Amino acid sequence: DGITWYTRFFRAAIYLLAMIYLFMGVSIVADRFMAAIEVITSHEREVVVKKYNGEKTTILVRVWNETVSNLTLMALGSSAPEILLSIIEIVGNGFEAGDLGPGTIVGSAAFNLYIIIAVCMVSVPTGQIRKIERNDVFYVTVVWSTFAYIWLYLILAVFSPNVVE
C-alpha cells in the first residue's frame, strides 16, 4: 500500500497528540460546565415558615430540588454527545435520520439505565448494604425507559417490520 513503518509511526504520533489535545479541550469545557451548574444549583431564596409555637422565622432554601438537578445534570452529561451527533447528522442528511442517530441515542440510554445501575450494585464492598434513598424517582425512570424500549421494539419488529431500518 506504499506506506512505510515510519510513516505509520509518524501518523500515529500525530493522531495521539491530536487526541490528547482534544481531550484536554473537553476537560476544560467540562470543568467550566460543572462550575456553571454548581453556581446555578446553589441559588437560595428566603422563605418564611411558622414554627410549632406559631412563631414565624425566615430560612434559606435552595431554588433547585437536589434530586431534579442531579438527574438533569446526569442526563445532560451522559447524553449530550449522542444528541449533538444526531443533530449534526440530521442537518447533514437534509433533515432525515441517518444510520447513526436514533440507534445511538437509544443504545446510550439503555446503557446508562441498565449497565451503570448494574455497576453501582456490583461495586458495593462485600459485607456492606447500601440502598437508594428515594426509590420513587428510580422507579419512574425504570418504568418509562423500559416502556420506551418495548414500544420501540414493537414498532420496529412487530407492527412495521422492514419498514424502518
Image: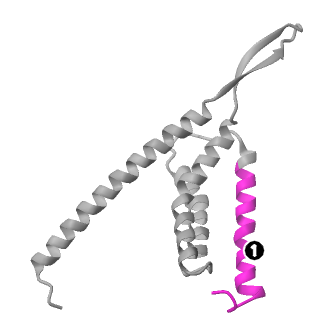
Q: Is residue 67 left or right of residue 1?
A: right
Q: Is residue 56 left or right of residue 150?
A: right
Q: Residue furthest right?
A: 54
Q: Which residues are magenta?
A: 138-165
Mark 1: amino acid = Trp
Can you give x and y, in whole percent of width and height, for residue 118 in the image? Answer: 56, 56
Give the residue at x 71% y 55%. Answer: 141
Can you give x and y, in whole percent of width and height, for residue 101 in the image? Answer: 57, 74
Can you give x and y, in whole percent of width and height, for residue 115 in the image? Answer: 55, 60
| Residue 6 versus residue 133 in the image, above or below | below
Q: How is the image coloured?
A: one colour
Where is mark 1, residue-wise? 151
Indicate the quadrant containing the C terminus: top left, top right, bottom left or bottom right: bottom right
Give the residue at x 61% y 74%. Answer: 102
Give the residue at x 23% y 60%. Answer: 17
Q: How many marks?
A: 1
Residue 145 painted magenta:
yes
Indicate the quadrant containing the N terminus: top left, top right, bottom left or bottom right: bottom left
Can you give x and y, in whole percent of width and height, for residue 89 in the image? Answer: 53, 75
Q: Quadrant of residue 91?
A: bottom right
Q: Work out whether residue 132 can be spotted.
A: no
User: Tag 1's secondary structure?
Assistant: helix
Q: Main secondary structure of the magenta part?
A: helix
Q: Work out whether residue 159 can be spotted.
A: yes
| Residue 118 versus residue 36 in the image, above or below | below
Label 1 crowding class (10 Å Cα cut-off): few <14, some 14-19, many 20+? few
Residue 101 painted magenta:
no
Q: Is residue 68 left or right of residue 37?
A: right
Q: Nearer the viewer, residue 85 or 78?
A: 85
